[in-house]
Amino acid sequence: MKVAILGYGKSGQAAEKLLIKKGITDITVFDDNEELDFLSISVFVSHHNYDVTVVSPGIDFSKYGISIDMIKNCTSELDLAYGSMDKSKKIITVTGTNGKSTTTSLVTQIINLLGLKAVACGNIGLPFGEAILDETVDVFVVELSSFQIDLLSNFNINSGAILNLSADHLDRYGSVDEYYLSKFSMLNFLSQVAKVIVLDDENIKSKLVDKSIDYVYVDKKFEKYPILKGDILDFNGYKFDVKSFKLFGNHNLLNLSFALLLASTVVDIKGDITEVVSKLTGLKHRSEVVHEFKGVTYINDSKATNVDSVMVAIESLKKPSTLLIGGRDKLSDYKPLATLINKNVSKVFYFGEAGDLISDQLSPLLKDIDGRSFLTLADAVKYAVKDAVDSESVILSPACSSFDEFKNYTVRGDKFREYVLKYTEELDD
Ligand code: UMA
Ligand code: ADP
């Protein structure tokens, strides 16, 4: 069997390992990165003649002027991995626009604390195809991006969540509806008894057409289910004191609610679980406090790569505060941020490739806000550090991808931290 692998990143390399393990060795890799010694994907597009083609999630065929349906027997690393895995093990999936990695990590931590072995994998970083090679794992908690869902054909989910939906990745999808449809198509891969946890939101509910699925709705105001009474969040069977949860903001309490409901499909959760909740930790680059200096708090929210996630971050700020926003635009509309910025932010520093574009959209809508533009993130941080006053928060919540200046959002977040430490140290001299 002749197999092509398109893209030799994490996903492509995991797929190659799986194929070799199955005894398939006639493999040709295509990748556009000139530093790797492979033929380019354009070469594949003009000559494709393979029995099976494994596609990496980052590949956008419209760039090459074709659609994926034009390629015979397409598959993905996730399909291959599902085909090879021990089917007695469970798969929990998490999708949505924001909060996926946090929720995936929380589900994994909860299951591990309650006695089974779980691993977080998929879009969060560790390829699912690599995770399944560990035979000691009981539950795979798979974060699914829309790109990965688009490539699924052979997959079976024991329980899953759709956390929320808002506009994102419009550089890849023709419209918001197309992007939403991609997320909902996760529901085509449910096992017969699967439980699906979704946000109690009219827009999402109206699109849940398959009434035979066992849905649990989570209310973001915590008035219907679960119910917040004082400091106690009650799931009708288990509850905890929200003060024991270390992660910041209402959105994270919502992520935890999804995580508990998903985890409860594989482990027994009952009674007062405050102690379990108190042990849960957050992830780097998501509203992460990286430094506190002379009364100023520096927050790295580099993972906030779309407008909705920045909205969540600004909701929990209060004046005085500085927002650093910019990077590479994803054809987003930044104007919805204006109201919350006017309410909770004092300075907006635009940086990077999209800086001027965002400033052009927001500046006319902002009142009494100090707005400034900088070429790079480093320049913006340098000025922010010098200009910050006591009790201020300085947050990097970029609403954009990082690719204009950095390899990815983690490098951007690490650089932010490095710049903060460097410039505050200089200030101290
Ligand atoms: N490549 C090309 N041509 C292209 C695009 C990519 O040749 O048009 C090549 C690149 O040169 C590179 C390889 O393909 O060598 C990269 O493949 P990829 O972009 O699919 O990335 P992987 O390294 O395989 O990582 C993928 C996910 N990446 C994407 O979906 C873009 C990772 O999610 C995931 O962690 C990993 O599989 C393991 O499951 C990252 C991501 O950015 C975190 N996800 C997006 C997001 O969260 O918004 C969807
Ligand atoms: P994802 O994996 O979906 O990108 P993350 O857990 O990495 O999500 O969080 C990314 C950013 O999204 C965070 O920095 C935060 O600003 C925002 N966020 C997290 N949870 C939510 C939520 N439930 N609703 C809206 N925004 C959220």
Image (cartoon, helix red, strand yellow):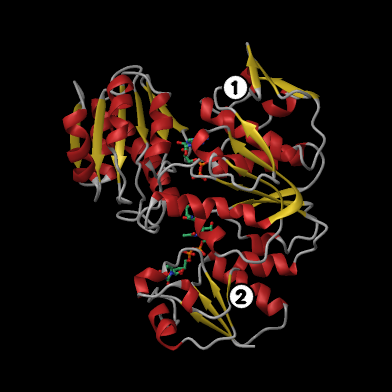
Q: Which residue is mark 1?
A: 222
Along the line of sight, which residue is nearer the eye, 269 or 176? 176
Marks 1 and 2, how far apart at CA: 45 Å
The mark found on residue 16 in the picture is 2
Residue 166 in the image: state x and y as whole percent: 44, 42
- Residue at x 39%, y 23% (from the top left corner): 317
The image quarter in which residue 418 lies? top left
Residue 156 in the image: state x and y as whole percent: 71, 58
Residue at far top of view: 230
- Residue at x 51%, y 80% (from the top left corner): 29
Residue 318 in the image: state x and y as whole percent: 36, 19
The image quarter in which residue 186 lies? bottom right
Mark 1, secondary structure of its residue: loop
Quadrant of the snapshot with the C terminus: top left
Q: Amino acid at mark 1?
A: Phe
Could you tell me if residue 232 is visible in this image? Answer: yes
Question: How many discs appear?
Answer: 2
- Residue at x 25%, y 31% (from the top left corner): 348
In the image, residue 224 above or below residue 146: above
The crowding category of the residue bearing disc 2, from other C-alpha atoms within 10 Å (few below 14, some 14 to 19, many at least 20), is many
- Residue at x 75%, y 40% (from the top left corner): 111
Q: Is 192 displayed left or right of 74 in the figure?
A: right
Quadrant of the snapshot with the N terminus: bottom right
Q: Which of marks 2 and 1 precedes in the sequence?
A: 2
